[in-house]
Image (cartoon, grey):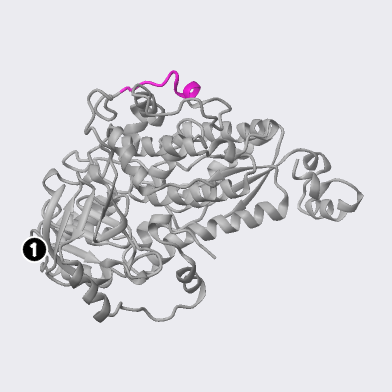
């Protein structure tokens, strides 16, 4: 065991004395040391209850003969950080999370790790750390928030509130109605209730084989979540004894499985960014063109918010991630022979899974669409790719051509959208918000929600080198690569230029001649932002392009 290197022998007496100063006994120190990586804080709704999860995990570890030792990581709430400078720290925090876990795990000799994430960047940051460390590991998330119906019976979520702001600006609802949504749309703890980024990544953790059944879908407030946490704590001991490690599980084929499940569920566009980054840590390369190939042969089986009326609690009741995987197995879309943290193969895990609601999870013979929920577009505006949640795009916007409305920041765009100056047919372009240019690749939920709230989501497209929230719906195309700050063609779009979006053909093109584009590159300056200090300054210099996962490079 790794812990023996810090605890065994006379020369380690000082190390043992330090543990004993905290109350650990010799008997406890003789057992495997299990690091409980908890992202609890009192800032994030998805994390406010994680101490309860951690306590249950510890009970499981203790019952199976291990010694649990808890430490914490940071966690940022994307919803609270949205629409201001704070969002620049969201994606960049993913690398801090991975680095801090690496530091703690390597410094203290843990034999195994139980990861407790919940929200957007914490899940991939922890998965990146698990792959990098390759110490026996298992995940248990905090679980999704519940979604409750409004007065008309429509299920509410955080996106309801964001879109309600746009509706207020357009004069469609009153301030009293906005307050009603504010008070009721987020009823308690958990990661926001739709198939937004947090729940996307928690479900894909199941699909990767890194968590037990139900980790991605059991609601945060259900007792079943605590029972699963205890089972997770016990299972890490089995992984330690069998020496089953993350890289035994997170293989190239496992990432292909996860991408197929991603397409079937209709996950957040951010899932592509994060899976690419996690794969990088695991020594696996994900080419964005591969994503379209998987999308072509994988049907979209779920219409979960923001793409449809259902939420993750409904997915859980309908059979969960394993039921979706069971359906995909019928068309040989998955490799069923891969190892998982259960100690069983994918095929063994899903053997008894079945769909309990054929509207929440459709069968492969009756999908919502024959192609997957995400598409990667290529063309003169995004030579290295751009990502769209195809399942959340209105049919009439799958192929759109319109004039560019160009903004050099999210703030500029929001001001214009709220003023009513964006017209049907327009293509809103927000640039200088990429990984390096933002920096931090801010999410554009405010402008997309404003557009949707004003009733323009079936008439207006939005394109950015930044990102979108998993809650975004409409023709929202992000991750444009190369980004503006790195000389991408999005830097040279001018007001009124015609842009053509063709999602079925995986195309996004700036309709100006190559000669004109080259002339602009010689005469137009890329808008530079002031020199940054601190972590963001270092991050902006070291971060890769979105098509590479926005990972840090030396």
At a point 26% along the width and 24% down the height, the residue shown is 358
- Quadrant where the C terminus sits is bottom right
Q: In this view, does 455 lie above or below 498?
A: above
Corner quadrant of residue 220: top left
Q: Is residue 335 covered in magenta?
A: no
> Crowding near pointer 1: few (<14 within 10 Å), some, many (20+)?
few
At a point 18% along the width and 72% down the height, the residue shown is 516
Q: Mark 1 points at which residue?
A: 423
Provide residue 146's location: percent of width, then percent of height: 35, 41
In this rendering, position of residue 48 left or right of residue 54 = left
Which type of secondary structure does the marked residue at label 1 adopt?
loop
- Quadrant where the N terminus sits is top right
Labels in figure, total:
1
Q: Given the current orientation, which residue lies at the most extreme top position?
A: 352
Corner quadrant of residue 193: top left
Q: Residues in magenta? A: 347-356
Q: Given the current orientation, which residue lies at the most extreme front position?
A: 515
Q: Is 515 in front, or is 105?
A: 515
Corner quadrant of residue 548: bottom left
At a point 64% along the width and 33% down the height, the residue shown is 239
Provide residue 120's location: percent of width, then percent of height: 42, 51
Provide residue 452's location: percent of width, then percent of height: 17, 54
Q: In this view, does 475 lie above or below 63?
A: below
Most prominent secondary structure in the magenta stretch?
loop
Q: Is 103 in front, or is 171?
A: 103
Q: Can residue 311 be seen in this view?
A: no
Q: Can residue 229 be seen in this view?
A: yes
In this rendering, position of residue 161 left or right of residue 332 = left
Provide residue 408's location: percent of width, then percent of height: 26, 73
């Amino acid at each position: 065991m790794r812990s023996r290197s810090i605890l065994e022998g006379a020369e380690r007496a000082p190390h043992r004395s330090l543990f004993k100063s905290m109350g650990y006994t010799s008997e406890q120190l003789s057992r495997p040391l299990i690091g409980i990586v908890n992202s609890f804080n009192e800032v994030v709704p998805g994390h406010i209850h994680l101490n309860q999860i951690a306590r249950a995990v510890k009970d499981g570890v203790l019952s199976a003969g291990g010694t649990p030792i808890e430490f914490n990581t940071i966690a940022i709430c994307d919803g609270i950080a949205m629409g201001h400078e704070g969002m620049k720290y969201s994606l960049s925090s993913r690398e801090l999370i991975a680095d801090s876990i690496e530091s703690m795990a390597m410094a203290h000799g843990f034999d195994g790790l139980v990861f407790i994430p919940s929200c957007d960047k914490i899940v991939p940051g922890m998965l990146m750390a698990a792959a990098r460390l390759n110490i026996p590991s298992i995940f248990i998330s905090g679980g999704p928030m519940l979604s409750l119906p409004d007065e008309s019976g429509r299920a509410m979520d955080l996106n309801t509130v964001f879109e309600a702001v746009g509706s207020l600006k357009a004069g469609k609802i009153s301030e009293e109605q906005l307050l009603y949504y504010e008070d009721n749309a987020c009823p308690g703890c958990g990661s926001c209730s739709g198939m937004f980024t947090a729940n996307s990544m928690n479900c894909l953790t199941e699909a990767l084989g890194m968590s037990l059944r139900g980790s991605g879908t059991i609601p945060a407030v259900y007792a079943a979540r605590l029972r699963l946490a205890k089972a997770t704590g016990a299972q890490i001991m089995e992984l330690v004894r069998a020496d089953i490690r993350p890289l035994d599980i997170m293989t190239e084929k496992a990432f292909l499985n996860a991408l197929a499940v991603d397409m079937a569920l209709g996950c957040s566009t951010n899932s592509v960014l994060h899976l690419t980054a996690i794969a990088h840590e695991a020594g696996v390369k994900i080419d964005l063109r591969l994503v379209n190939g998987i999308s072509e042969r994988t049907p979209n089986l779920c219409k979960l918010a923001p793409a449809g009326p259902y939420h993750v609690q409904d997915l859980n009741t309908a059979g969960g991630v394993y039921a979706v995987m069971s359906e995909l197995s019928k068309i040989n879309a998955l490799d069923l022979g891969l190892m998982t943290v259960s100690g069983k193969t994918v095929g063994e895990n899903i053997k008894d899974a079945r769909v309990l609601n054929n509207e929440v999870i459709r069968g492969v013979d009756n999908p919502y669409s024959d192609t997957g929920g995400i598409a990667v577009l290529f063309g003169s505006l995004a030579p290295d790719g751009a990502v769209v949640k195809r399942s959340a795009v209105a049919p009439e916007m799958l192929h759109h051509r319109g004039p560019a409305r160009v903004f050099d920041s999210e703030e500029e765009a929001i001001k214009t959208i709220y003023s009513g100056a964006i017209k049907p047919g327009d293509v809103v372009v927000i640039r200088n918000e990429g990984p390096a240019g933002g920096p931090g690749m801010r999410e554009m939920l405010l402008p997309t929600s404003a557009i949707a709230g004003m009733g323009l989501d079936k008439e207006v497209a939005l394109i950015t080198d930044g990102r979108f929230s998993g809650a975004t719906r409409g023709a929202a195309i992000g991750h444009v690569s190369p980004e503006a700050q790195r000389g991408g063609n999005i830097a040279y779009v001018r007001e009124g230029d015609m842009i053509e979006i063709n999602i079925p053909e995986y195309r996004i093109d700036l309709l100006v001649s190559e000669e004109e584009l080259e002339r602009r590159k010689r005469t137009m300056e890329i808008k530079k932002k002031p020199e940054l200090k601190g972590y963001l300054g270092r991050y902006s210099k070291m971060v890769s392009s979105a098509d590479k996962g926005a990972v840090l490079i030396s």
